[in-house]
């Protein structure tokens, strides 16, 4: 099998790859057209806007769009996502403007919610930004949990998102990340357990436990965990209810990569080969970088793909 792996944030979405290339070259019109065509397909819009914002955050390309079309709703939503990314980067680097950038990002998100009231993406962006307020000092980061067994978190934001896109993949990942960013993985496990009682078959939320297993491995590496009942059960659920079933939205490369890893590491290499076949040449740095004992995630991915292909060839 070819050792080349394509790591591209747009993954299998060819139209998105083209728009990203244009953004990187300082051209914004294909992004405007892509978001217009995406319309109210909220899962696709959320996924595409995340990738486009990452590409746009490194330049002033959206400022050029604003000069030509300042009233664009899609532009306002994308600028909110970009502002959030820049605020998070400023906080990580301890930039002296981190505080004002946080405020600017929050204002951009609220502006986007006002001019695009039905759009879930601004609420996803606000959940992403919520990690900068672990003490929940801001009012929007409170709210009552939907179950007495669940602990405090930015539930009000999630409730606003769920009104618009009930099973938002990224939104629920952001909610989980809120707890993980504080080292409260136990609360994250409770959230995921609760969520799986509601998420329908076919939803990419069925894969959330696989992300938690990677987090557990990062915090205390133990290769045998991948063949234990809990990991095996979660991989089987994702395989049956998401991969074999009718997916509720476009499958992301990072979700496919987590499933391929869970199956391969759980000694279910023939099934892993089928997931790798869907991925084709594409791959995601995660989870491979987090679970590679040598630190070389690319090498581990290539080796896993070869092993899976050999196992499939023997069947």
Image (tube, grey):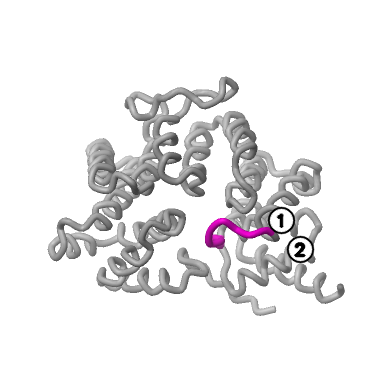
147 relative to 13, above or below? above
Any part of residue 97 in sight: no
Q: Nearer the viewer, mark 2 or mark 1?
A: 1
**Front one among 245 and 3:** 245
Over which residues does the magenta segment extend?
245-253
Q: Identify whether 313 is placed above or below 273.
A: below
Image quarter for residue 19? bottom left
Disc 2 and disc 1 in contact, CB within 8 angstroms: yes
List x then y, in percent, for residue 9. Answer: 46, 63
Q: Residue furthest bottom?
A: 2
The residue sitting at 30% across, 69% down in the picture is 33
Query: Could you tell whether 259 is left or right of 67 in the image?
Result: right
Residue 271's label in the rendered image is 2
Q: Toward the viewer: 247 or 61?
A: 247
Q: Position of residue 6 (x, y in %)?
A: 54, 72
Q: CA distance from mark 2 to mark 1?
A: 8 Å
- Residue displayed at 23% across by 64% down: 61
Q: Which quadrant would the C terminus be assigned to in this image?
A: bottom right
**Is 192 located above or below residue 60 in the figure?**
above
Q: For residue 249: magenta?
A: yes
| Label 2 or label 1, whichever comes before in sequence order | 1
Residue 223: mark: none
- Majority secondary structure of the magenta segment? loop
Residue at 79%, 46% (x, y): give it.
Answer: 224
**Residue hosting label 1:** 239
Q: Is 51 one of the magenta-colored residues?
A: no
Q: Is residue 45 left or right of residue 90?
A: right
Residue 153 x/y as whole percent: 46, 28
The residue that appears at 80% across and 72% down in the rendered structure is 312
Question: Is residue 32 shown left or right of residue 253?
Answer: left
């Amino acid at each position: 099998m070819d050792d080349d792996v394509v790591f591209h944030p747009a993954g299998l979405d060819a139209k998105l790859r083209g728009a990203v290339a244009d953004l990187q070259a300082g051209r914004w019109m294909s992004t405007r057209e892509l978001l217009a065509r995406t319309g109210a397909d909220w899962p696709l819009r959320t996924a595409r806007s995340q990738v486009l914002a990452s590409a746009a955050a490194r330049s002033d390309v959206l400022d050029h769009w604003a000069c030509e079309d300042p009233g664009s709703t899609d532009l306002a939503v994308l600028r909110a996502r970009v502002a959030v990314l820049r605020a998070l980067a400023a906080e990580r680097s301890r930039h002296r403007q981190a505080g004002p950038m946080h405020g600017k990002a929050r204002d951009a998100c609220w502006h986007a919610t006002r001019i695009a009231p039905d759009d879930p993406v601004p609420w996803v962006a606000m959940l992403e930004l919520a990690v900068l307020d672990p003490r929940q000092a801001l009012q929007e980061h409170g709210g009552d949990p939907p179950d007495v067994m669940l602990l405090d978190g930015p539930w009000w934001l999630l409730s606003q998102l769920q009104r618009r896109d009930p099973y938002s993949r990224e939104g629920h990942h952001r909610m989980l990340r809120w707890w993980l960013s504080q080292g409260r993985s136990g609360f994250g496990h409770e959230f995921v357990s609760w969520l799986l009682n509601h998420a329908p078959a076919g939803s990419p939320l069925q894969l959330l436990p696989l992300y938690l297993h990677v987090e557990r491995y990062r915090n205390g590496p133990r290769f045998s965990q991948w063949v234990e009942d809990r990991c095996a059960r979660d991989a089987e659920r994702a395989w049956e209810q998401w991969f074999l079933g009718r997916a509720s939205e476009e499958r992301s490369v990072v979700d496919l990569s987590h499933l391929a890893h869970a199956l391969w590491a759980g000694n279910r290499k023939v099934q892993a080969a089928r997931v790798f076949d869907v991925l084709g040449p594409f791959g995601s740095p995660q989870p491979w970088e987090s679970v590679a004992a040598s630190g070389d995630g690319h090498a581990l991915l290539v080796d896993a793909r070869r092993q899976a292909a050999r196992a499939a060839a023997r069947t």
